[in-house]
């Protein structure tokens, strides 16, 4: 299982890193582990769910990149 850092989640989901921290603070995204410096790591599927939840509440569509689509 590949785990992603907060900045990697932000890049993948095309959101600001502060958004990832908000997802965590609000309970939408739970860390799946810690890196060697004690920073949280996240599963891609969990990031996609947090992103989908946020976009649904805002009335926007899901970013394909966060669920494994093109992230160019």
Image: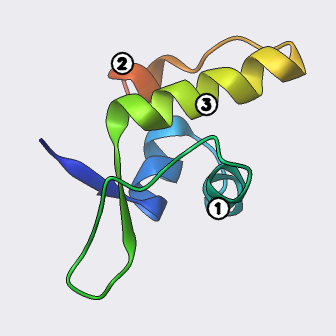
Q: Quadrant of residue 5?
A: bottom left
As drawn, the residue found furthest toward the bottom would be: 37
> Residue visible at 66% across and 47% down?
27
> Residue visible at 57% across and 21% down?
63
Label 2 SS = loop
Q: Is residue 57 above or below residue 45?
A: above
Using the rendered image of the protein, determine whether residue 72 is visible from the camera's viewpoint.
no
Position of residue 54 measured from the top left corner of the image (x, y, whole percent): 74, 29
Q: Which residue is mark 3?
A: 51
Left or right of 51, for residue 22: right
> Residue visible at 47% across and 62% down?
7
Of mark 2 and mark 3, the one earlier in the sequence is 3
Q: Which residue is mark 1?
A: 21
Image quarter where the C terminus lies is top left
> Residue visible at 63% across and 40% down?
28
Position of residue 20 measured from the top left corner of the image (x, y, whole percent): 61, 54
**26 or 2, which is in the foreground?**
26
Label 3 SS = helix
Left or right of 29, for residue 40: left
Q: Which mark is residue 30?
A: none
Position of residue 68 measured from the top left corner of the image (x, y, whole percent): 32, 22
Determine whether label 1 and label 2 are within 8 Å by CB.
no
Q: Which residue is mark 2?
A: 69
Q: Is residue 29 above or below residue 63?
A: below
């Amino acid at each position: 299982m590949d785990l992603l850092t907060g900045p990697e989640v932000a890049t993948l989901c095309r959101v600001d890193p502060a958004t990832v921290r908000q997802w965590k603070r609000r309970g939408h995204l739970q860390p799946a582990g810690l890196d060697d410096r004690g920073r949280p790591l996240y599963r891609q599927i969990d990031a996609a769910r947090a992103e989908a939840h946020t976009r649904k509440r805002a009335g926007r569509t899901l970013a394909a990149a966060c669920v494994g689509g093109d992230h160019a």
